[in-house]
Amino acid sequence: MQFDFPLSQLESYAPDEAAPADFASFWQDTLAEARSFPLNARFVPVQSLLRSVQVYDVTYAGYGGAEIRAWLLLPAGTTAPLPCVVEYIGYGGGRGQPSDWLLWPSLGYATFVMDTRGQGTTWRTGDTPDPQAGGEPHLPGFMTQGIAAKETYYYRRVYTDAARAVEAAGSHPNIDASRIAVTGGSQGGGLAIAAAGLVPEVALCMPDVPFLSHFSRAVTLTDSAPFSEIAAYLRIHRTRVSETMNTLRYFDGLHFAPLAKAPALFSVALMDFVCPPSTVYAAYNRYGGEKAIRVYPFNGHEGGESQQAQEKMAFLAAHLPLDVGL
Amino acid sequence: MQFDFPLSQLESYAPDEAAPADFASFWQDTLAEARSFPLNARFVPVQSLLRSVQVYDVTYAGYGGAEIRAWLLLPAGTTAPLPCVVEYIGYGGGRGQPSDWLLWPSLGYATFVMDTRGQGTTWRTGDTPDPQAGGEPHLPGFMTQGIAAKETYYYRRVYTDAARAVEAAGSHPNIDASRIAVTGGSQGGGLAIAAAGLVPEVALCMPDVPFLSHFSRAVTLTDSAPFSEIAAYLRIHRTRVSETMNTLRYFDGLHFAPLAKAPALFSVALMDFVCPPSTVYAAYNRYGGEKAIRVYPFNGHEGGESQQAQEKMAFLAAHLPLDVGL
Amino acid sequence: MQFDFPLSQLESYAPDEAAPADFASFWQDTLAEARSFPLNARFVPVQSLLRSVQVYDVTYAGYGGAEIRAWLLLPAGTTAPLPCVVEYIGYGGGRGQPSDWLLWPSLGYATFVMDTRGQGTTWRTGDTPDPQAGGEPHLPGFMTQGIAAKETYYYRRVYTDAARAVEAAGSHPNIDASRIAVTGGSQGGGLAIAAAGLVPEVALCMPDVPFLSHFSRAVTLTDSAPFSEIAAYLRIHRTRVSETMNTLRYFDGLHFAPLAKAPALFSVALMDFVCPPSTVYAAYNRYGGEKAIRVYPFNGHEGGESQQAQEKMAFLAAHLPLDVGL
Amino acid sequence: MQFDFPLSQLESYAPDEAAPADFASFWQDTLAEARSFPLNARFVPVQSLLRSVQVYDVTYAGYGGAEIRAWLLLPAGTTAPLPCVVEYIGYGGGRGQPSDWLLWPSLGYATFVMDTRGQGTTWRTGDTPDPQAGGEPHLPGFMTQGIAAKETYYYRRVYTDAARAVEAAGSHPNIDASRIAVTGGSQGGGLAIAAAGLVPEVALCMPDVPFLSHFSRAVTLTDSAPFSEIAAYLRIHRTRVSETMNTLRYFDGLHFAPLAKAPALFSVALMDFVCPPSTVYAAYNRYGGEKAIRVYPFNGHEGGESQQAQEKMAFLAAHLPLDVGL
Amino acid sequence: MQFDFPLSQLESYAPDEAAPADFASFWQDTLAEARSFPLNARFVPVQSLLRSVQVYDVTYAGYGGAEIRAWLLLPAGTTAPLPCVVEYIGYGGGRGQPSDWLLWPSLGYATFVMDTRGQGTTWRTGDTPDPQAGGEPHLPGFMTQGIAAKETYYYRRVYTDAARAVEAAGSHPNIDASRIAVTGGSQGGGLAIAAAGLVPEVALCMPDVPFLSHFSRAVTLTDSAPFSEIAAYLRIHRTRVSETMNTLRYFDGLHFAPLAKAPALFSVALMDFVCPPSTVYAAYNRYGGEKAIRVYPFNGHEGGESQQAQEKMAFLAAHLPLDVGL
Amino acid sequence: MQFDFPLSQLESYAPDEAAPADFASFWQDTLAEARSFPLNARFVPVQSLLRSVQVYDVTYAGYGGAEIRAWLLLPAGTTAPLPCVVEYIGYGGGRGQPSDWLLWPSLGYATFVMDTRGQGTTWRTGDTPDPQAGGEPHLPGFMTQGIAAKETYYYRRVYTDAARAVEAAGSHPNIDASRIAVTGGSQGGGLAIAAAGLVPEVALCMPDVPFLSHFSRAVTLTDSAPFSEIAAYLRIHRTRVSETMNTLRYFDGLHFAPLAKAPALFSVALMDFVCPPSTVYAAYNRYGGEKAIRVYPFNGHEGGESQQAQEKMAFLAAHLPLDVGL
C-alpha cells in the first residue's frame, strides 16, 4: 500500500523546518573534539580462503577515541591507490564476515565497512562496543540512548564515527582519499548523508531508503521500528517531548543534506513503512549536490535490492571510474 | 492454553542442574566488593498531596557504588520501627510515581521500592541509570548486556542492587531491619528470590510468577520476551552458546532458591508463556524455607493480580504482624 | 501513529450534529422513572487489613430499581463530611477489590466506586448483574444490547445508574453532597461526562480518554473494540442501520457535554484507536463548563496513566480543597 | 498442524470422566418442567419467490415457555408425512433466511431449522431472544452466561429448546415424527448429540465437528473461541474454577452420547483448534448407537463442507429413505 | 473501518482513465478466434439424490478450444425454455458440488455454473485445467500469469470462457437464450461485468462486490489479495511496471462497464479491503445500462450475503419473470 | 522455540518409511527420457562491470528438453579446469543477477547457478518458464502442481533439471567434471540431496536446512509454507489424500539420501518451522556418504547464514582443494 503522499507531491515536498542555529557549530565542535584523538588507523591482514580480495581487520579512533572496527577489502594484487566505497550498515546489524562484502571489490574498488558501535546483534554480528553508552533508561534499542541532550545522544557518537571512517579509509596507502564514495541502506543511508554533509572530501554519495531523516513527521506517521522507538519512549516519558524532539533536530538528515556537495544517487520505496517516502524526499529535495533518485513504487523497506545494486554499480563506474588515475 | 507440563508433574519437577562450583564464592565476592562502597542511603522527604503516607526519595550505593534510586513510603505519623516490604519491579518498568505504591502503606507497612538500573522506559518511568553498562553489542533489552562473562553480566549489578536495597531499607530509623519482606512480580519475583538467597536477614519472600529461573529450559521453550532475548542473541551470535549459557548459571533462580530460608509465598500461572510454570516450579520445589504456592490455572503472565494481592496481604499479616514489636 | 486529524484541527473540531429534539425529555423521564424507586443506599462496613481507610460495601437502587453495588472508601477516622470522588470504570471491568482504589483516600478524599452492571469479567471482577438485560440477539459485549430502541438500550440503564451513584454517594453522612467529583477512564470517562450532564450537583468532572462520544464518526473510523461492536452488529443486521444510529444519538457524549457546567479536566491521547481523539475533542469542544485538556501525543488508549493521575490530583486539590468546609 | 493426539490414539481415546450422579434426573426434571408449558407450535406460511419449497415461520415454546423461532421448509406439493431433518446452528449464528436452507428440501425431506436463542449476530441473523438471560457478569458470548449453577446456565435453556424442536417438528401434519434426523455443525453438532441423548424418538444423528464435548480437556487445550471463553472467564473469576467446571459436567457431550441410540454419522477434522479432535472422539467413542465417523485429516473447523454434505445425503437416504412410508 | 472515499464522493467518482485505443478490436479478435473452435457444448446428466433439480455435467470449448467444465441445474420436470442464471465464481474457488447451487433452481430458474480454469483449490474444488498456462515465472496465484503481454494474460482466457459460457447455456434446448442473467461475487462479479460487456445478448447483470476493476488505483491502495498479487509481482520484477500496467488496461472492468447495456444490480461494501469501494464505483458509475446498487456500509468483502440474495431474487423476478414466455 | 524432538532424539531419528518399489526405475526412466534430448549447453558471455569474474548466461536442456537458464561465473583469467560449485535456489526465488553470486568465484571456484523453472517472483527474479506446467487446479505455488501422478508432478521436472545442471556445468571446458559440488539452502538443499542421489559424479554435497524431505511427517507437523501448501491442497481436495501422499514418496529426500555417496556437510536449525529438524535429520541419518552436520540450536529457517558460509568454505577447501589438479 502506498500510504504516504502521492509521488507527484513527494517530488516537491519541502517541509518548513530549519536547522537549529548552532547546528553547524555543534558539529564543528564535535568533529574537532573527535579529531583531538589520533585517528590511529590500523590495518591487520586477515588470513582467509578468499583469493580475489585481500582483507584487513581495521581499528580506528571514533568518537571520544573509542576503538571502531571495520573491514577493508582490496582487490587482490592492488598496488595503485584505488577509489574506495565506504559502507555503513543498517540498524541493528554489524560488519559480519568479510565474505559478506564482495560486491565492490569484485568491481575493482576498495571497500571499507564500518562496524556500528553497540549494534551487531539483531541481524548480523558486530564487534564494536559503545564504551560511552551512558546507561540512562531508554527504550531497548539505540534510538533513545542519551536522548536527553544532543551532547549525549547515541547518534552523535555514530555520526562522528562515520565521518572518521572516511578519514580512516583515506589514510590507507592503496586508497585514493579524493575518490571515496559513501553508501549504505536505511541507517547506512542516513549515515552516508551525514558523512557527505560533514566531510567535504566525500566524492560520491549513494544512500538507499535512508533512515534518520525528518523525525518530526516520522514519529507520528509510522508504527514501524526504529522510528517507533522514539514514540515508544515518549509514550512513557510523557514530559520529555520537547527536549527529545529538540535533540533530534541536531541529527536530522534534513539538515545534513544541504551541506553535502558530492553527486548523489538516492533510492526510495513508496510502500516503505520503515523509512516513509516523505522522509526520504524531504532530505533528497534539499540535497546540496548533483542528484538523482530511483523510485520503487511497489517495494517496502527492502527497496531496490539487486536492481538498485546494478544502478549503483553504473553510477559508481560513471563518477569514479577505476582507471582514471592511472 | 496450558502448554507446559501438567500440574501434577510440575509439583514434583526437579531438573538435574547443579550450581557452578564457585557460585557461592562468586556472590560472596560480588557482595563484598559492593559493600566496599559505603551504603550512603539518603532519604529526602518528598512534598506531595498524599496525606496518609510520607514519601522519601531514596538514593543508595548499589553495585560498584552506583547511585540507585528508590521510594520509601511510610504510613503518615509513623514513629516506631515498622516491618517493611521491599518491592522489586517487573522487566522494563521503573519506580514511577509514589502514588503507584499505596497498597502496603495503607496496610500500615513501610514500603521501599527499588528502581531497576537502566530500566524504566517500556511501561513505567525509571530514574536510575546503569553507569557500568559496557555498551557491548547485545540484543536490545537487558537480558544479554555483558553476557560474555559473569563478571560483566547486567544482572550481576541488579542482583547486587537488590541485596543492597534490603540493607538500605533496614538502615532507616523507622524500619525494623529484622522484619523485611521482599516481593515483586516477574523480574521483581526473580529479584525477590535472589535477595532472599543472598541476604539472610530477609524475613519473608513473596515472589509472583517469578522470572530469571531455569534458563536452560526456558530459552528453548518460549518465544516470549524477555527469555526470548537470549535465544535472539544466540540466533546471531551463533558461536557463543556455551559461554552464554555458562554465564546464566550464575544468575539462575534455581541456585538462589535453596539458599533462601525465609518463609515464602509463591504464585504461578499455568498459561504463562513469559515465565513458564516449569521454570517457576523448578525454583519453588528447591526453595529452602517454609513455603506455599498459589496456582492460577487459567492465567497468563498477569498471574493472580488483585486476588494474589489479597493472598499476600494475609500472608504478610500472618508472618510479619504489625504490632508485634510494640 | 497519529491516524486522526492533526492536533490543530482537533482543537477546533465541531461536527454538525444536533441532539434529538426529545433528548432532554427522554432523560428527564428516564431519571424521573428511576427516582420513583427509593434510592435505598446501604453501606455495610467491610472488615479488611487496610488501616488507612474504612471500606463499605454499598448497594443502591439504579435503573428500574436494580441493586447496584459499589465500594465506599473513607480515610480512616473521617468524621466531618468530605468531598468525594465518584469513580466509573472502563469497559468490561468491575469494581474489583477495595485495595484497588487507594489513591483518592490516600489524598484524604472519600471515594465511591460504582460497579458497572453486567460487566466485570473481561479484566476485573464485578458483582452487579443487569436484571433488565433483555436477551435480544446482540453482538457479544454490551454495545448493542437492546439497541433496537432507546428505551431498551443497555446504556440507558448504566447512565441512570451513574447518575444515581452521585446521589448515593451524597447520601452518606460523611460525604459533602455539594463537593462531588466524577471521574473515570474510557467508558468511565464517558459516564463521568454523562453524569455531569445529567446531575447538576456534580462539582467537578475529570474524564480520561472518554468513550461513548461521537458515534457517527467512530463507527466508520476505528476497528477497535468496543466501538467496533456496533459496526460488527450492523455487518450482520444490515437492515438496522438507521434504527441503530438513531438509538445511539440519545447516548452520545456530544449531547451531554453541553449540559455539564462543572469545571472539567479532560485527557486525550493522539494515538488512541479505541477512543479516537476526534471523538474526545468533539465532546470537549462542546463541554459547557470551565475546562482544560491534557494531550498525550504519543499514547494510545492507556492515555496519561500515572502522569495524568498527578494532573488530576492537582486539579482536584485546587477545585475541591479538602479543608475548605471545616 | 495436527496438534492433538495422533489418529490411532484418538480412535481409542476414552477419558475417565463419569457423569454427575444426578445427571439423568437433572435433565428429566428440566424437560418435565419445559413440557409443563404447552408446546404451542405455530406454522405461519411465508410468501416467497421460492417455487420448489413451501416455507413456514415457526414459533414454539422452548425452555421456560419462551417463544423459539424456526423455519420449516417442505418440498412444494408435499401431502404425505415426510421424514424431517432438524438443523441446529453453529455458535453465534441464527436461522437467517429460508433460502439459506435448500439442501434437504431439494432432496425431498422436510427441514426444520431451530433458531438459537440470543444468538444470531456474529455471522447470520437470528430472531429469538433469550428472555431468561439473567444479566450476571459473564464473558461476552454465551459460554459463561449463568454458569454459576447448572440451573441457570445458558445451555440448559438451549438444550431444552433443542429437544422441544424435535417435538415441534414432529407435531406438523406433514412430518413423520418417527423419522426425524438431527444434524448440525459445531454447536449444531453438540446440540444434535444432546437432542439424540434426550429425545429417544430421534431416528438419526449427524453431528459435524461437534462442539460442547469434553470441557475438562478443551479448556486447557485450545485458545480458540468459544471454548476459550470459559478460560477467559476463569482468568478473571479466579475463585470460581470448581463451581464452573461442575456446572459444565451437566452439559458435556460426553454424558449425552451414551444415552443416544439412533444411528449416527459423525465428522471430525484433525487440524480443528475450535473443537479439537480428542473432544470429538471422546463423545464419539462413547456414543450409544450404531455409528460411523468421517475423518478430515487436513481440515480445521470448517471440516468436510460439501464433501461431508455428500456423505450425509447418502447416510440420510440409506437410513431414512423417502418413499418407505408410501 | 471505512478506509476509502466517503460515500458521497464514491457516488460521483469518475477516474480519468481511457480504454486503450485497440481495446474493442483486441476483444473482437479474441472472441472471433475463440469462436473459430466449435462450441461443442455437451450436457451429461448426473445421477444424484437431488429430487427438485436435474443436474448436468457440462463441457464446452472456451478460449483456445480448451474444455471448460460447468454444471447445469434445471428445475425437475422442466420442459419449456427457461430464463437462466449464469454464475461465475470468486477467486480461487471451483464449481464444487451441484448441491452447492440450489438457490436459482429453487426459484424456478435454470442455473449454469462455470468452473474457472486452473482455479478450484483454495476454497472449493474445481475440475478445469488451464492447458494454455505458459508456466512463466509469476506470483503464486493467477493475477500475474502471462502478464507480460495482453495476448498471454490469464484473464484473456477466462474472460473468453465467460463469454462462451453464455453461449453454451443458451445452446441448451430448455434455456431461453434471450433471457440469460449473469452474476457472481468478487471475481465472479468482475466476470459478470466483462460478459455483459462482451456479449450483447446478456439480459441482466448482477455483480456483487466485483473484482478486476480500476487496477491503477487498486494496486497502490490495498494490501489484500488478490489485487496485492500484482504489487507483489512488481516488488520483485521491478523493471516491468509499465508493461504490467499496460496489460491490465485490457482487462479492467472500467472499460467493459460502458459496453454493457443489460439492466444491472450491483452491490458494494464500504469496508471492503479486497475490492475497495472506489474500484467498484469506478465501474458502476460508467456502467452502460439501467442500474442500481446496494450499499453495505459496515461490511467487508463478504458484502450483503443472504440479504443481497434477497435483493437479487427480487431483481431477477422483476426483470426476467418466469412465466412471461408461456 | 524448539518445537520438534529434542536433539538427542533427532540424532537417532529413523522413521520406518521405505521407498516405493519402483523408485529407482522411475528415476532411471525419467533421467533416460531427459537425456534423450541433447543437453545443448550454451554459454553466452555477459558484459558486466565485474572485474574479478567472467559471467556467462547459460541455457541447457532440462526435463522434456525445456530450456533451463543458469549463470556460470568463472574467476577472471581462468584457464585450467576448475572445481565447480553448483548452486540450487530456495523456494520462490530465481537466479537474480550475476552479482548475487560472488562468494565461490572469490574463493577461486567456478560457480554454476541453476534457475528454478517457473520460480523467481517471490523474492528474487527468475528467467526460466516451466513450459510443461499442466495448468491443473492446484494450490497457488509449486508444491501441488501436477501432484495427481508422479509422472506429472512439478518436482519431477525440477529434480531432472537439477541432475542435468551438473552435466551442463561439467560440459564447460574450464570445469573439471569430476570435482563438482552441489549446494543450496532449503529447496536448494533438497535439490542438492536429490542431485547427489541421482548423479554419481557429484563429488561433494552441502545442503543447508534442506527442504523436500520426510513429507509424511512434515505435512501434519508444520503450518509454514511451503510444506503447508500440501495440507492446504488436501484441505480442499479431501478425496485425494492417498494419491497425493503416494506421489510425494517418489520425491522424498529420505529416499535420495541413501543413494548419495559424496561426502556431505549438512546444516540444521532447531527452531526451523519451515523445514523442521526431524525432517532434516530423517534424511541426514540415512545419507549414504561420509557426512557431518552443523546444528544451530537457536535459529529458524535462516539457519547458519554467514557462519555456515564459513563452514562450507572450509569444507569445500578441504575436500575439493583448488590446486590439486595443477
Image (tube, coloured by chain):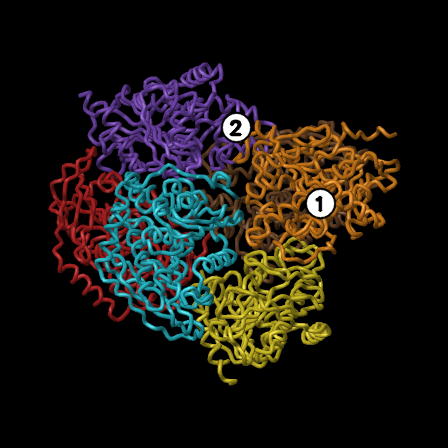
Chain colours: A brown, B purple, C red, D cyan, E yellow, F orange
Which residue is located at x 68 percent, y 41 percent?
F20
Q: Could you say which disc has been placed on residue B134 in the image?
A: 2
Question: How many neighbours does mark 2 have within 10 angstroms: few (below 14), some (14-19), or many (20 or more)?
Answer: many
Above or below, comparing residue E218 to residue F213 in the picture: below
The three-letter code of the residue at mark 2 reads: Gly
**Chain ID for label 2?**
B
Front-most of residues A135 and E224: E224
Residue on which the image places disc 1 = A203
Front-most of residues B260 and A218: B260
Is there CB contact under 8 Å for labels 2 and 1?
no
Looking at the picture, how far across and down is residue E165, in whole percent?
Answer: 62, 72
- Quarter of the rendering occupied by the C terminus of chain D: bottom left
Asked if residue D93 lies left or right of residue E23, the reply is: left
Asked if residue B43 lies left or right of residue A42, the reply is: left
Label 1 sits on a secondary structure element that is loop
Front-most of residues F29 and D326: D326
Q: Could you say which disc has been placed on residue F143 in the image?
A: none
Which residue is located at x 55 percent, y 35 percent?
F4
Above or below, comparing residue A246 to residue E151 in the picture: above
Judge if badges 2 and 1 mark residues of a common chain. no
Asked if residue B19 lies left or right of residue B101, the reply is: right
Above or below, comparing residue F160 to residue D44 in the picture: above
Asked if residue F168 lies left or right of residue B186, the reply is: right
Looking at the picture, how far across and down is residue B95, in whole percent?
Answer: 36, 34
Please state which of the two labelled residues, at mark 2 or mark 1, is closer to the viewer: 2
Can residue F317 be seen in the rendering of this structure? yes
Looking at the picture, how far across and down is residue B194, in whole percent?
Answer: 39, 23
Question: How many neighbours does mark 1 have within 10 angstroms: few (below 14), some (14-19), or many (20 or more)?
Answer: many
